[in-house]
Image (spheres, rainbow, N blue to C red):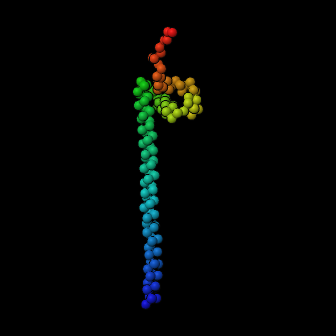
Amino acid sequence: MMEWTLGILLGLAIILTILSFFRKEKNSRYEQQIENMSISFMQEIYQLKKQIRTLELDAEIVAQHTPLATRSETQVQIMRDVLDLHKRGYSSEGIAAETGLTAMEVDHVLTPFLDRPDEGQKVVYHG
């Protein structure tokens, strides 16, 4: 009787081991589908963030009374790139190196966007 019990348990163990391999294969397929969906969502999120950044830069350009409609797409893209790099902390020289413009051209593009808190506040001191 003991041999029969051991034989049945051994047979059951072999059957369960074989079934577990089929289960892993099925789960692996689902994991692959989930991973593909995750990659797809990440790409879409990246594209949305990029579009939002472009809209934010365009809004700032328009807010500085620089009409986009009168500029070519190349000019608008240069303004976006320069403004984006400036917001990320690049110096005029660094922006010039990244965009291929001169530092003087970069400063000219950035002039409407730079905060100048001391403008209009010059007081003559008579002492």
Give the quarter of the image for residue 23. Answer: bottom left
Which residue is at the front of the view, 75 or 98? 98
Residue 105 place in picture, x, y as percent: 55, 25
Figure check: 94 above or below 31:
above
Residue furthest to the bottom: 1
Residue furthest to the top: 126
Figure check: 108 above or below 26:
above
Figure check: 12 above or below 63:
below
Which residue is at the front of the view, 35 or 73? 35
| Residue at image location 44% in from the left, 75% down from the top | 16
Residue 71 place in picture, x, y as percent: 45, 27
Which residue is at the front of the view, 89 or 34? 89
| Residue at image location 42% in from the left, 61% down from the top | 30
User: Is residue 74 visible from the viewing direction of this image?
Assistant: no
* Horizontal side, residue 49 vs residue 98: left or right: left
Give the quarter of the image for residue 5. Answer: bottom left
Residue 115 place in picture, x, y as percent: 47, 25
User: Is residue 106 visible from the viewing direction of this image?
Assistant: yes
Residue 10 place in picture, x, y as percent: 46, 81
Which quarter shows the N terminus?
bottom left
| Residue at image location 40% in from the left, 27% down from the top | 63
Residue furthest to the front: 127
| Residue at image location 45% in from the left, 17% down from the top | 120
